[in-house]
Amino acid sequence: MTTNRRTFLKNCNICRRRCNGRWFDFGLCPQKSESQLASIMKSVKKAHSQKFNMSGYAAPAIPVVRVGIIGLGDRGSDAVERLSYIEGVEIKALGDKREVCVKESQKYLVGIGRPAAKEFYGDENIWKKLVELPDLDLIYTCTPWNITYSYFGIFNGAWKTCCMRSSNCTYH
């Protein structure tokens, strides 16, 4: 049996749809799925009372946001540059397991006239010391996502944001 490109891609899509646990109707669906519209409309029409709404909420202004950055590879070093352009942002700490990355980011900050940041490097768990700094308002993580960073940052009173390949998130 010979397989051409079209047949190969068609078979891959069939397998992908089956593996995702869903069938989409592209003429390959063995049965039509039932519409969920009735149950959705029933839920929408139920009476409910609004308990709290964050719409329009604004936190009190912070004159200077003090940032610590974990992970200074390509994404992290770019974050240092981007954050350095923002008025009212002070980069207070730089952390990475590789010393060269921390030194390069530090060199950039000093080169543009910004104050030198505290340096954390040399160990797989050096980020814990960075996160425990009492004077940070925001921890910017540019490493593969790890919930541990979030917990440490939140318990130490800092906002936590992570820069990931496919999405960005912010926690407090």
Image (cartoon, rainbow, N blue to C red):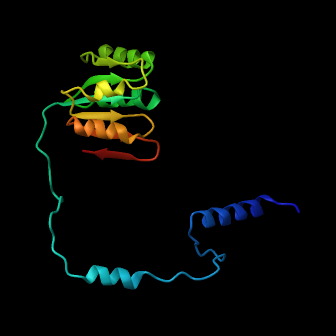
Q: Is residue 163 above or below residue 79?
A: below
Give 77 or 45, whichever is nearer the viewer: 45
Give 153 or 142, whichever is nearer the viewer: 153
The quadrant in which the C terminus is found is: top left
Quadrant of residue 157 within the rendered picture? top left
Residue shown at 36% from the left, 38% from the top: 148
Residue shown at 37% from the left, 20% from the top: 105
Quadrant of residue 109 within the rendered picture? top left
Total labels drawn: 0
Q: Residue furthest right?
A: 1
Q: Is residue 121 above or below residue 61?
A: above
Residue 148 as seen in the image, left or right of residue 26: left
Residue shown at 27% from the left, 18% from the top: 117
Q: Is residue 43 above or below residue 165?
A: below
Residue 86 as seen in the image, left or right of residue 95: left
Q: Residue 145 in the image: state x and y as whole percent.
A: 42, 40
Residue shown at 61% from the left, 66% from the top: 17
Give 126 or 44, whichever is nearer the viewer: 126
Q: Residue furthest left?
A: 60
Q: Residue 25 in the image: state x and y as whole percent.
A: 59, 76
Residue 89 as seen in the image, left or right of residue 8: left
The quadrant in which the N terminus is found is: bottom right
Quadrant of residue 61 within the rendered picture? top left
Q: Is residue 44 above or below residue 80?
A: below
Q: Residue 24 in the image: state x and y as whole percent.
A: 58, 72
Q: Residue 35 in the image: state x and y as whole percent.
A: 47, 82
